[in-house]
Image (spheres, helix red, strand yellow):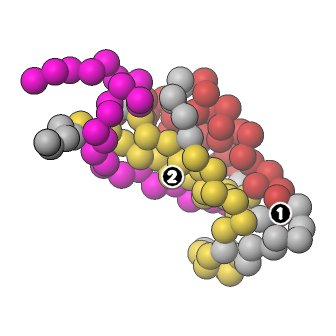
Amino acid sequence: MSFALHPMKEIRVIVAGEHRAFVTEVFDRVKATGYTIIGNVSGKGHHSVREAHFMFSEQESLEIIMTVVPEEKVEPILAGLRPLFERHSGVMFVTDVAVSRQEYFGKKRTDP
């Protein structure tokens, strides 16, 4: 038995925890069917090294917030996130992915 794979887009946003609600509200407004949040992330970027601090507030650490959406939802998400990136540091990646259950991501199932 093999799975059919369907093209989608993954949007991965890395921002300070204090901006989590802004990102998830954009995802909700565009009707992304879900998202995953990974907290207390460390890394090195344009503004130096950021270490995860498990004992301090989530607001101070970096978080990765990711979602998978049909291609037509990418532009509305980018437009919604633009004000955040104009005022605050962070990074966003948009990549091609393939999913086996497209109905989980806001697409109607299309049988071959």
**Residue at the far front in the pictured view:** 1
Q: Which amino acid type is shown beneath numbered disc 1? A: Glu
Instruction: Work out whether 98 lies above or below 47.
Output: above
Q: Determine whether the residue tagged by mark 1 lies in a helix, strand or loop.
A: helix
For the record, the magenta segment spans 89-112
Point out the image quarter for the C terminus.
top left
Which is more toward the observer, 63 or 111? 111
Kind of residue at disc 2: Arg
- The residue depicted at 89 percent of the width and 68 percent of the height is 56
Instruction: Report the number of discs.
Output: 2
In the rendered image, residue 110, in percent from the top left (x then y), is placed at 20, 20
Farthest left residue?
Answer: 112
Mark 2 lies on residue? 12
Give whichever of 56, 74 is nearer the camera: 56
Q: Quadrant of the N terminus?
A: top left
Residue in front for this viewpoint, 76 or 100: 100
- Badge 2 density bin: few <14, some 14–19, many ≥20, Cα 10 Å: some
Q: Earlier in the sequence, mark 2 or mark 1?
A: 2
Indicate the quadrant where residue 82 lies. top right
| Cα–Cα gap, marks 2 and 1 | 19 Å
Q: Residue at x 83, y 56 (%)?
A: 59
Instruction: Say whether residue 79 is visible.
Output: no
- Residue under numbered circle 1: 60
For the residue labelled by badge 2, is the local secondary structure a helix, a strand or a loop? strand
Write down the quadrant of residue 14 in the picture: bottom right
